[in-house]
Image (spheres, rainbow, N blue to C red):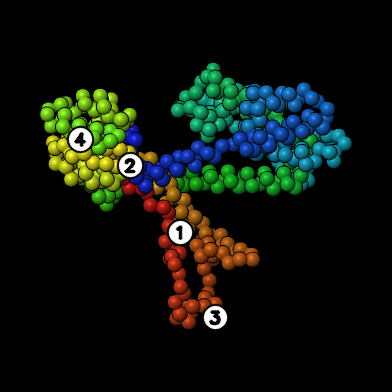
Amino acid sequence: MRVKESMFYQPSRGEMGDQARRASVQGKSVHGLGACVALALKQRAQDQGLKEAGIVCQSNRTARRCSIGLVALAGLSLAVACDTQQDRAAAPAEPAVQAEGRVDVLARFLALEPAGPEDSVVAEVGTTVIYASDVRGEIAARSLHDHPANVAPSDPVFQQVLSELTEQRLLALEALRRGMDRDIEARRRLAAAEERILGNILVETVVANSITDEAIERIYQEQNRLAPRLEEVRASHILVTTREEAEEVARLLAEGEDFAQLARQVSQDPGTRLDGGDLGYFTRDGMVQAFSRQAFATETGETSEPFQTDYGWHVLRVTDRRVQPRPGLESLRGNIVRFLTLEGIQTLLDTVRQTYPVTRSGVPAPAQIRAPGPVPPGDPEESGEEEPDDMDADEADAPEEMPQR
């Protein structure tokens, strides 16, 4: 609606929250670690006297590829190389996969199987393979295509991601050949990466099963029942600089001048001028206070007296009134899915905490993860004294409520 394009439109707190969340998500890029990888490559080139490698790393092609070094094994091989390369006179021969203290990464590469009968090998790297499902999974994870499962191998996006995965596999295999996966720090980082991935898979599997069409419909109906339906007005306005100009506009309108035509000629609001000053429907909170007060005080079909806001002088005409319509299910589906996801994660965590007691050293664990046990002597619960508390632990641990519209 044009109301959102007007120069004095005030976004609601919910809209500002959504914008902040979108900005936060968009701001989480991988270029920080990618830059570290690029610097590591350049430093290794300088140490070995290969000036041309430094030039290549600065090129657009390789700089783009350096940014994909986030994947655990590729980033790991470069980072560990920077820390340990000077201490090694020569790269060791490739050790046996099952050597003592070794993370069995190469065996995992070799043991990879196709995702299904239709899955095909799209690249062979050494004795390992990359499947089409690997490429499409990466495309989906990075949101590079609207329908990643249908991306053909001939698609430029598919070929670009395949090139990146091939280079990633090459770096990982070379790191294994040099024995870098036996380094203590490497093993810790590999274990941490595996832990994150397993946790994500558990959440995706369990939570996805709880997000059904029936659950979405139930939340939608609850929101419709609880959310208030506010009054809205639809108005058009003409914005000018001075009171004298506004009074002249009011005079012309009183003499029968067409409101929309006059708005196109003299209004200084670029967001509505070409639409004849039409602001669309808005609630009392949808505009600055002075404007809303005047709009809701004006009868339908009537034209206001000139009034002032921080943006200048206005003359408005109210063209319609209504009760705010209920939003459709599809417009709320995204918010509902996010709410159910948070709720599912919280339920899952509450369940697994009962299976795996948590004990933290040095400082008391938060109440929500503290293992249940007998009340110690002198505890306020035993003595009958009430423990001061600003927020109930259950409230503090509850999932965030879904924004209402």
Amino acid identity at mark 4: Glu
In depth, the one of 45 and 287 nearer the eye is 287
- Residue 56 percent across, percent down from the top left: 72, 23
Disc 3/disc 2 C-alpha distance (Å): 64 Å
Circle 4: element type = helix
Amino acid identity at mark 2: Asp
Circle 3: element type = loop
Residue at the disc numbered 2: 310
Closer to the camera: disc 4 or disc 3?
4
Disc 1/disc 2 C-alpha distance (Å): 43 Å
- Residue shown at 49%/55% (left/top)? 349
Q: Is residue 192 left or right of residue 156?
A: right
Amino acid identity at mark 3: Pro
Residue at the disc numbered 4: 247
Quarter the C terminus occupies: top left
Disc 1/disc 4 C-alpha distance (Å): 57 Å
Above or below, comparing residue 110 to residue 343 in the picture: above
Q: Label 3 neighbourhood size at 10 Å, few (<14), some (14-19), many (20+)?
A: few
Residue projecting furthest to the left: 255
- Residue 391 percent across, percent down from the top left: 43, 65
- Residue 377, labelled with which disc? 3
Circle 2: element type = loop
